[in-house]
Image: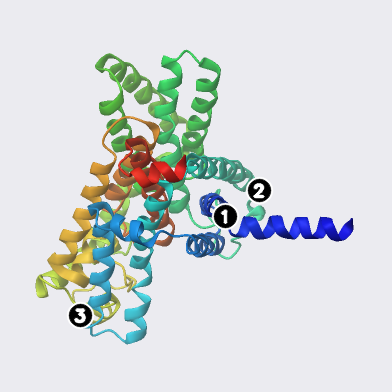
Amino acid sequence: MTTLARETTGGMLLRRLRSPVAWSETVDLFAILTAASLPWSTSLAGIFNALLLVCMVPFLDVRAFLESLKRPICAAPIALVLLALLGTLWSDAPWGMRLYSLSPVAKLLVIPVLLYHFERSQRGHWVLIAFLISCALLSVVSWLVAFYPNLSIKPDNPERGIFVKNYIDQSQEFTLCAVALAYPVVLLLREKRYWLAGLLTALAVSFFVNMAFVIVSRTALVTVPIMLAVFAVLHLRWRSIAIISALLVAGAAAAWQASPQLRKTADTFVSDYQLYTKQRIPTSMGERLEYWQKSIQFFRDAPIMGHGTGSTQGLFDKVSKSADWVPGVRVFPNPHNQTLAVAVQWGSIGVVILYATWLFHLLLFRGDGLANWIGLLVVVQNVFTSLFNSHLFDFHEGWMYVIGVGVAGGMVLRARGVSPKAREAGS
């Protein structure tokens, strides 16, 4: 009897290993784990994503996958990666730096993979829910760390309310979740499901309250109104826009009066600029202005093909020794602007491909539905935050973009039924 049970169990495991459905479910699981771990750990997110890619191989329909790569939403990010690879040939940077600089761009190759898989999977929404729940838990921990700083695992460089990573990453997560919840709240209110709408509203407000009273990045302060405006224009009537705008203004005014942390963050816009421009004292904003000015000059020196992959560090090292470099400004291999990060390395060709990538992904998410809204929001957030950072190439924000566009985009394609094979695979 024991032998028979062992053989039955072994047979079940063998059949499961040979089942395309089982492998697809495993890919879904690793996608969920990747999204859930991203707010907490770069290492875990990378490991789970690698396992996701490995599990896709055994039953991948190579012909269908290659066919899917012809779509502009896939071809554009692939083209940017290929340009970065070619850019290593004309760069003057050491080969180690050239290869290292490929890594931030290479993650864009995961977008076509996720689009392909979640066009066929019915579990894309679980990936998005996992990210939301993970961020909600991080918000609770952030409050605990704000009152008990010793709980932070960053004792060497503590930041108020930051348990892991940094306040920029955390603000990006909380902003995306808070604004994304606006769409389901409106739908639930229209369906008169008030309890669930109230629960999601409370969750969204909790993210905003954390940013108002614990810590928030200046980038988030700039992008939140833009993201809310996009939602209002797309999904609300003018009367509702007027009422909600009045409530938001009142809430922002109350938060401004009640939160010294919020006023301090906003005041640094002016103080940092004045310290840099009038007294030549290095500040966060002053350093950005210095990087931008020098990057524009680098672009003018090589406007078509740029200076090559990984060249930014050497260019800034060289110019930092000149007389017009502000003393004390750090030499950083990142101009803190996505367009300039691309323009310096790959010139106008790279900028055209970058903007095409954003445009094709924006067009993918035109239409109604939660997946359309989340995907659109991910792209809009990345476009506007990339005015002040190279967020497409940064690990955390870059993976937020890859996962958001890949998963939500696959859900949108599935809903539109653009692929008969996808429908058959999911039935």
Relative image position of residue 3 (x, y in whole percent): 86, 61
Q: Give the residue at x 35% y 20%.
A: 244
Q: CA distance from mark 1 to mark 2?
A: 49 Å
Q: Give the residue at x 25% y 27%.
A: 233
Give the image quarter of residue 294.
Answer: bottom left
**Of the residues shown, which amino acid type is indicated by label 2?**
Tyr
Q: Say which residue label 1 marks.
A: 19
Badge 3 or badge 2: first in the primary sequence: 2
Q: Say which residue label 2 marks.
A: 148
Camera-nearest residue between 14 and 353? 14
Camera-nearest residue between 289 and 38? 38
Relative image position of residue 116 (x, y in whole percent): 38, 52
Q: Secondary structure at mark 2?
A: loop
Badge 1 or badge 2: first in the primary sequence: 1
Which of labels 1 and 2 is toward the front? 1
Camera-nearest residue between 113 and 298? 113
Camera-nearest residue between 292 and 259? 292
Q: Please give the label number shown on residue 322.
A: 3
**Of the residues shown, which amino acid type is indicated by label 1?**
Ser
Left or right position of 352 against 403:
left
Above or below for 328 versus 58: below
Give the image quarter of residue 397.
Answer: bottom left
Above or below for 367 versus 53: above
Neighbourhood count class around disc 1 (C-alpha, 10 Å): few under 14, some 14–19, many 20 upward: few
Q: Secondary structure at mark 1?
A: loop
Q: CA distance from mark 3 to mark 2?
A: 45 Å
